[in-house]
Image: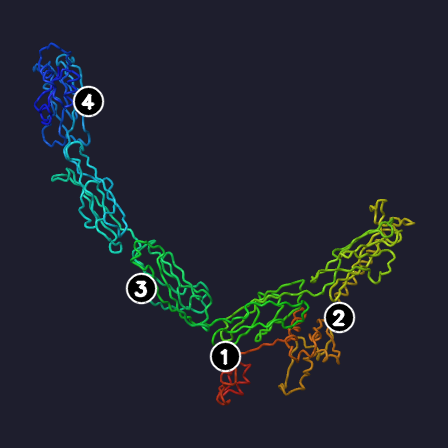
Amino acid sequence: MWTSGRMSNAKSWLGLGMSLYFWGLMDLTTTVLSGTPPPQGELAAFLSDKPQSHQRAKRSWVWNQFFVLEEYTGTDPLYVGKLHSDMDRGDGSIKYILSGEGAGLVFTIDDTTGDIHAIQRLDREERAQYTLRAQALDRRTGRPMEPESEFIIKIQDINDNEPKFLDGPYIATVPEMSPVGTSVIQVTATDADDPTYGNSARVVYSILQGQPYFSVDSKTGVIRTALMNMDREAKEYYEVIIQAKDMGGQLGGLAGTTTVNITLSDVNDNPPRFPQKHYQMSVLESAPISSTVGRVFAKDLDEGINAEMKYTIVDGDGADAFDINTDPNFQVGIITVKKPLSFESKKSYTLKVEGANSHLEMRFLNLGPFQDTTTVHINVEDVDEPPVFEPGFYFVELPEDVAIGTTIQIISAKDPDVTNNSIRYSIDRSSDPGRFFYVDITTGALMTARPLDREEYSWHNITVLAMEMNNPSQVGSVTVTIKVLDVNDNAPEFSRFYEAFVCENAKAGQLIQTVSAVDLDDPLHGQHFYYSLAPEATNNPNFTIRDNQDNTARILTRRSGFRQQEQSVFYLPILIADSGQPVLSSTGTLTIQVCSCDDDGHVMSCSPEAYILPVSLSRGALIAILACIFVLLVLVLLILSMRRHRKQPYIIDDEENIHENIVRYDDEGGGEEDTEAFDIAAMWNPREAQAGTAPKTRQDMLPEIESLSRYVPQTCAVNSTVHSYVLAKLYEADMDLWAPPFDSLQTYMFEGDGSVAGSLSSLQSATSDSEQSFDFLTDWGPRFRKLAELYGASEGPAPLW
């Protein structure tokens, strides 16, 4: 029988120095393990070695649980308990062996006495108990004296662990201006000690830092607001330190701390306010629509959605000229141009701008009003503006047969500035590459410069430019849309080439072809064509024509009995007339071949039978004919070649031939008063000047073009339509590829101030020749020696070159 004892645990109900003896009874064992004292009768039997009247079968083990304190810091091994077998007589014949968890490493046993010691420091938080097995052996034979049995060593807890905040540090948010007692966050501390034993794991919370703004519940760890009207704009961040202490907060308990960072979130408790009650801005009158004039800003101490603003113009004389928008990123009001400005019309504007919060909170409306106003003064600055056309768009309709030089529209522009500078007009040639139009530089009269053809260009979109005389960089433009109206200037003609056939067996009145026509004109009421035989074919005995009244006509036979041998092809002239004013017509020819056909009218052959020569030619005769033809061809080519290379003598006339000759003039021109030097009439009509003479012509030069005035009445040159006259001559010269540029008119309106030679005008010259020095002529070389001698003042010898 085994005996076990624990000599150090004073809290056992049997006492630390008492050994427990179990007979192995299940009920007694249960009683002992549960901590309840056994009955006196059973305890007496338990302590006696003598058999009783109600003897039970004994068990060989004496069982107990051992308890040992953790964290032993002594130098000697910690005594745990003692194992003893009733077969041990104290003579050392019994050997005790310990096995199981920690045997030999954590716990050792004296194999003679059965004393158990702990040889390592124990920590209940790492391991709460150990299960071991004990056995008694005969030291001499090694035979087990008792069956092996298990027992438990429990580690008893001490307060060696402080509470810890496993989730710390904490971050929390609470709205500003929250009522007292508003829950912010709950913190939780964990103690590793045994919560079932004593107060080692009983935690109490307290606040070390963060008062008087916040408080903490000592049992639950819930942090709450403790001060009313906490303002984020005054202080936004708070650092709160919470302590958790075990042993119920008593003296000697262990403590742990954590940090809680609390941020006050924003609410809309601050109304917006403009830092300036008056804004002064300026804008150029040329500023485009939607361009920025300036910015206004209403300051709001809140942030995020609570600081969002909406700006509006609530009053002022500029509400129609300006607009205001809110920048969502910076919450500023951007004032922009709403319509074109004019310094000449209005020089300044006044706006009353309101800034208001977009999102309001009902519980803070008493802190309002959540809006504010400011006054904005805007001055319009003058700029040099380009000319402005009135109207801003021109639409012109004109017939295509309008005469060259006809004024079709007066284009008008003016300088909007106060100075009202003079304006010069021109056409943007990129909009009129064909140069069909011309605009008068001063009056803005738009005229035709070339004949118009609706069938070629039915629409013209040209751009007329207006430039200030004093500032050529200021250029305005306007679009002129010209619609060319149709006139009946194109005769109808066949839509395609027609070629018909008639059978030899055709009968009179038989249809052989249907023809149609086209006309490039586009009359208002549509086209209508009339068909008839040409006057020379009115009494044609072979064919006739019938108008279908639908712009087509039928060609019918008038007789029968056509024969290829008599005539194989007929040419029928057909007159086609339109319905325009004036009526235009053309003649088209229908080619009709006579063909051999079968009874069903299908063509068999349209070629006449070849004539058979009555006498056949021999091969020699054919060769002789071909040789003669070849000789004739060679002779013809030779004659043509000789004529091409033959040089004909020129007509030499010293008075007429001025080609590459130097003409000397020894007399000085008579000026405007000299009316005998030349015939001025020849300049107006060169044809009349040459009518009385027949000058000799040169065969090596093409004849010069005739005067352009043959197409223009001579009275045009001296009356008010000089523009039409010049434009007509210009068009004819442009169309004549052989016409050299005989005349060139250059207009010089300004002095060349930038020239190195300076002004050539005599108006600013010296008053007399004596005040001028011509010594520089001596430096110009031999060609100017004579001038140097005449005007030079130098008395020295002439230079040698």
> Which callout, 4 or 1, points at the residue further toward the start of the chain?
4
> Which callout, 4 or 3, points at the residue further toward the start of the chain?
4
For the residues labelled 2 and 3, the Cα–Cα distance comes to: 102 Å
Q: Residue at x 84, y 62 (%)?
A: 536
**Mark 4 near mark 3, Cβ–Cβ under 8 Å?**
no
Q: Tell me which amino acid carries mark 3.
A: Pro
- State the SS at label 1: loop
Name the residue beneath numbered marker 2.
Answer: 648
For the residues labelled 4 and 3, the Cα–Cα distance comes to: 84 Å
- State the SS at label 3: loop
For the residues labelled 1 and 3, the Cα–Cα distance comes to: 65 Å
Percent coordinates x, y for residue 532 in the rendering: 81, 60
Left or right: residue 161 versus residue 515 is: left
**Which of these two is toward me, 421 or 668?**
421
Q: Nearer the viewer, mark 2 or mark 3?
A: 3
Percent coordinates x, y for residue 418 in the rendering: 47, 76
Q: Nearer the viewer, mark 4 or mark 2?
A: 4
**Which of these two is toward me, 334 or 96?**
334
Name the residue beneath numbered marker 1.
Answer: 757
